[in-house]
Image (tube, grey):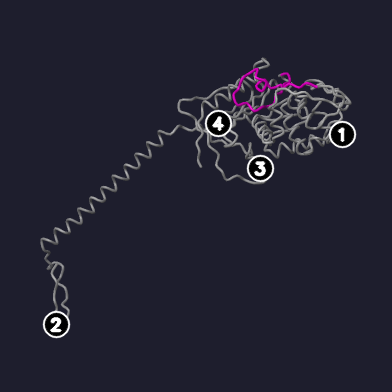
Amino acid sequence: MSVVRRQPGQGIQPPKPANEVKSSPKASYQFKLVINRQLWLGLTLIFAISLILILVKKTGTDRPERSTQATNRLASLGRKINLTGQQSTIIAPIPVKKTGYGTTYAPARQAILVDLDSQSTLYELNPDQPVAVASTTKLATALTIRKLWPEIETKVTISQRAASQSGSLANLKAGQVFTIRELLYALLMMSGNDAAVALAEVSDPEQPKFDRFIESMNQTAREYGATNTHFADPAGLNDLQGRSTARDLARLMAATIADPVLKEIISTDKLDLVDQSGQLVPLENSNRLVTGVVTLPGIIGGKTGFTPLTTEGGAGHCLVIAATRDNHTLIATILGAYSVDKLATAKIGRDLVNWGYASYDWLNLN
């Protein structure tokens, strides 16, 4: 570039018109060099962006396809049930369906399989249809007693009304004295209707139909998110009025295993109660997955139920269970198993839980 030097006494000369300016060969070369450099940078940037887009697309297609069901959430389930009024900020690992794994089928009227921590539904079959649920009702009975009577060493005398119950029994006798804790074992292990009545009498001794206690049961169920549920008696014998769903019972099971006392009870296979006179009352868990008749690795416990499956509204064979493996807890509900085999729900529950662990990986988002 030439420099115009101003002579003494001269003013600043105006520039020549553009069409009169002549560029030197060196300036022309520098201009072309700048243009070529900008063009090269632009092409490089376009290539880099294209490469990134290709890699992102490939990563997305290589990721295992998530099950539609795995995105469903259960409101207020498990350790995320708001028992303390505090919300956790930790994101639980999300179950993601493995490539090549299909769905499964539970031969029952209703069923559900959920992942406790992420609140994800892994399998469902009519999960929100209210039906009779028989003795799985006793989960709500136990949760209600735990809320109303936290002092579980309180002693209770078995009444004649409790001792005269029919159906599934713990064989309690009128006049025997047990603690609330011991009656909870009789309730959840042996599914004792006598224990259910004895516990209801603790809170509602004057009401022949336990109206106030049943109201508390339904309130407890709603507190745990079981909004499609209505219980009509503490034992679950009233199939014509008592109703719940597979999803709601999963919520109640989640609340049960969140309670250390109740979790210990449903995990116990055998236990002997001793009354005030030293008489033994042997208890054995009605859940064959807990006793080992049907094997399920990681079983925590559960609750059985049965009334004859008839057109009048019987429940059939029912089961709610929880199992844990590798720090992932699954809850399964089976209502109205089609088989008349007494082990049907245990086998269906086993197969459903095994399918869940085999078909899913857990993605940690933290």
Between discs 3 and 4, the one toward the N terminus:
3
Between discs 3 and 1, the one toward the N terminus:
3
The one of 183 and 130 positioned closer to us in this rendering: 183
Residue shown at the point (15%, 70%) measured from the top left: 17
Q: Which amino acid, mark 3?
A: Asn
Which residue lies under the disc numbered 1?
Answer: 205
Between discs 4 and 2, the one toward the N terminus:
2
Residue shown at the point (69%, 31%) measured from the top left: 263
Q: Which residues are magenta?
A: 281-308
Q: CA distance from mark 4 to mark 2?
A: 92 Å
Q: Which amino acid, mark 4?
A: Asp
- Rendered location of residue 260, percent (x, y): 69, 35
Q: What is the number of the mark on residue 10?
A: 2
Is disc 3 placed on a helix, strand or loop? loop
Q: Which amino acid, mark 2?
A: Gln
Residue 299 magenta: yes
Which residue lies under the disc numbered 4?
Answer: 326
Is disc 4 placed on a helix, strand or loop? loop
